[in-house]
Image (cartoon, grey):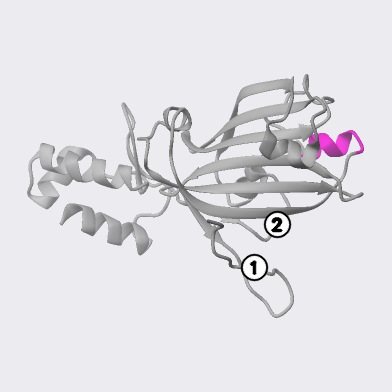
Amino acid sequence: MIADDLTSKIKDGELPPGSALPPQKELSTRYGVTLATLRQALKQLEDEGLLSQQPGRGTFVYPRVKYQLTSLHGFAEDLRAQGQTVTTEILDQSAGTPPDWAAELLGHDPALRLERLRLVAGRPAVHQLSWVRGTDLVEADLSDTSLYAALSSLGRLVNRASEVVRPGLLDEPVAALLRRTPGEPVLVSERVTYALDESALVVDRATMLGSAMEIRTERAATGLSLQWSRPAT
């Protein structure tokens, strides 16, 4: 009852993204339940990605962000354009030899391994592992700079990107980084970004929490072309 009512209010816009819920004692009185029952309902909605409980601050409506397929921008740029607060934690930024899945496009020469954790409104939402051709950006500060912008500053312009998004299951060690339980459903993005000469410039894989992200696109008679296919078996 409590979870259903709050869910309806969130989806109907009565409780907009970022808004604070009343104190728990007030809510428990309003619904005529014990604090334990109320907290169980709030925990359920937090697990579903609708609420964020912040110790010492309160409970807030957590915005489900949109992952746009129609733009050629970095992840953080897309979300900031939606008014979201996005921060990036650099987990690894070093030179290395690409693994097979990236080497198929980049070759086996030394490349930049860039592992990032994206936080939306302070909560981990996306784990992203990128392999970038060359090692020019190994020492660059990419914590608050778009990778595409950093490449552009070196004269390595982005032309287009090809991306496949599939359903998957969260596994370790990414589950620990995203502070979620292994086996939880996620969205897995595999993107290849090409330079003006059509050579692969960036190959990356991103694991996105399904509870925090939704895929959104606009269709028109002339514009984005979406191809639907069955996964290879």
Which type of secondary structure does the marked residue at label 1 adopt? loop
Residue beneath disc 1: 226
Q: Nearer the viewer, residue 150 or 7?
A: 150
Which type of secondary structure does the marked residue at label 2 adopt? loop
Q: Kindly identify the residue that appears in the image at 80 percent across and 35 percent down.
A: 107
Disc nearer the start of the sequence (1/2) = 2
Q: Is residue 197 magenta?
A: no
- Magenta highlight range: 148-155
| Type of the residue with mark 2 | Ser
In the rendered image, the residue lying farthest to the front is: 233
Instruction: Please state, as top left, top right, bottom left or bottom right, where the N terminus lies in the image.
Output: bottom left
Question: Does residue 131 appear to the left or right of 213 in the view shown?
Answer: right
Q: Can residue 142 be seen at all in this image of the molecule?
A: no
Residue 93, percent from left and from top: 69, 22
Considering the whole magenta stretch, tell me its main secondary structure.
helix
Q: Which mark is residue 33?
A: none
